[in-house]
Image: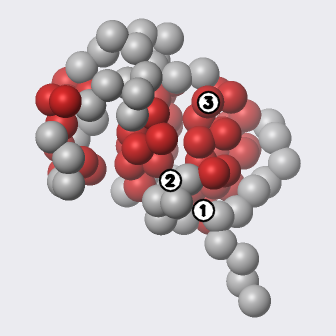
Amino acid sequence: MDKAVKISSVFPKHLFWDVKLEQLDADRDQDLIIPRALFMTSEISFQEDIEKLERIYSSAAIINTLKNTKERISNRVCEMVADRYHIPVFHRYSHR
């Protein structure tokens, strides 16, 4: 894991529309960076998107952050993450 990485050189700027991208710190801002990096992922782009995260964070950090985030991460993204790491499926939203 390389937490000294410049987030602006790894992820698209539009994912961080509400913060100053150059001020993001991989360690301090993990709770924002991880969910935002997967916010707009799809089945087509998931592999590339998750690999970018894995260069910076452990699988445990990615999983824990997604399970606890308040960001709007789709259940499908959670399913893809669970499948990648061979863990039980988890969802951010329940269908009642």
Q: CB of mark 2 within 8 Å of CB of mark 1?
A: yes
Label 1: element kind? helix
Label 2: element kind? loop
* Coloring basis for residues: secondary structure
Kindly identify the amino acid type of the residue bearing the numbered disc 1.
Arg
Disc 3 to disc 1, how far (Cα)?
Answer: 19 Å
Q: Considering only order in the chain, which callout, 1 or 2, is on the residue closer to the N terminus?
A: 2
The residue lying toward the viewer, choosing from 80 and 1, is 1
Q: In percent of the image, x 39 and y 34: which residue is there?
A: 29
Disc 2 to disc 3, how far (Cα)?
Answer: 21 Å
Q: CB of mark 3 within 8 Å of CB of mark 1?
A: no
Kindly identify the amino acid type of the residue bearing the numbered disc 2.
Glu
Count the marks: how many? 3
Q: Which residue is mark 2?
A: 43
Q: Which residue is mark 1?
A: 76
Residue 75 location in percent, x, y? Answer: 62, 65
Figure quadrant of the C terminus: bottom right
Q: Which residue is mark 3?
A: 61
Q: Which quadrant holds residue 64?
A: top right
Kindly identify the amino acid type of the residue bearing the numbered disc 3.
Ala
Residue 79 location in percent, x, y? Answer: 68, 55
